[in-house]
Amino acid sequence: MSTAELGALARPATGEVQAGGSLWRTIGRAFTANRLAVLGVGLIGAIGLFCYLGPLLYHTDQVYTNLAAANLPPGAGHPLGTDYLGYDELGRLMVGGQSSIEVGLAAAAMASAIGVIWGAVAGYVGGVLDAVMMRIVDVVLSIPGLFILLFIATIIPPTLGTMIAIIALFAWLVPARLVRGEVLSLRSREYVQAVRVMGGRGVRIVLRHLVPNAIGVIVVQATFQVADAILIFAVLSYLGFGPSAPAASWGEMLSSGTAYLYDGYWWQIYPPGVAILLIVLAFNFVGDALRDALDVRLRQR
């Protein structure tokens, strides 16, 4: 086979590029046709605006306590009341949402990056290296993750940075397995063989050909991981292993509110609980819709 023929195999033809564009438009239509997906995107956008634009319009002091205004019910000046330290609940809900969203996105990004590299290398190289790398993944997956996370959180000062690192420590395992499986199916394709015959290095093949073609699986899993990371962060904060006051998080707000569960202070429990529920559901709705839309691409391969 000539070099020109190999080059033709290594790069998509014009018709294939156009077909690819049409395929992605089909995927986009399938996604937007899913009402839960549209609802999920709307919720994520609304919560993001609430958490980041809200504090610019609704100014509250979330640093210094005001015990004289503790446990006030919703009313004039405090639409969602105050907590046991006198913090305005609405303002704290906004600030706490920022930390939850930032931890969720950052932990998912870090976990996805580690998982993609690990899985792509294992799937492309194969053989003994693949077996060793995936056995490591299996061993770590067999460890009760929540207990390890709690243990690490007790010995490391809880900051947003450490929370991101702690959550990502276990979250990369699932994307590593998924990407490895995708790469195993892609590495035997003609265009990959053509690049290899033309002298393409393994790093180039992985980064320029295999990972981009596995992007659908990566994006879908990353979406679910954002929801998982937000939920794990809420659990850790609820149990008292989150960032210390005056830092706020929805899990910490829910934890402090449950101390007054039988005192009728419902405004300290329901808002953070509903916020956690809504954002986790929203990312799961988007992830489910992306996975269903991606099935169109998989069926047309």
Image (cartoon, rainbow, N blue to C red):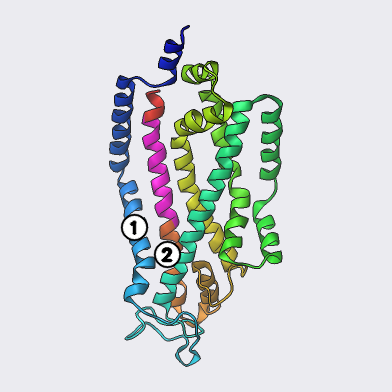
Q: Position of residue 236 (x, y in %)?
A: 59, 63
Q: Residue at x 39, y 53 (%)?
A: 282
For marks 2 and 1, give the CA distance. 13 Å
Identify the secondary structure beneath mark 2. helix
Name the residue furthest bottom.
68
Residue 262 counted in the magenta span: no
Look at the image and give the residue range highlighted in magenta: 280-296
Picture layout, residue 26 above or below residue 110? above
Q: Amino acid at mark 2?
A: Ala
Could you tell me which quadrant the C terminus lies in? top left
| Residue holding disc 1 | 45
Q: Residue at x 34, y 63 (%)?
A: 49
Q: Residue at x 66, y 57 (%)?
A: 149
- Residue 273 visible in image: no
In the rendering, which numbered label is found on residue 275?
Answer: 2
Name the residue furthest top.
1
Q: Amino acid at mark 1?
A: Gly
Q: Position of residue 248 (x, y in %)?
A: 50, 72
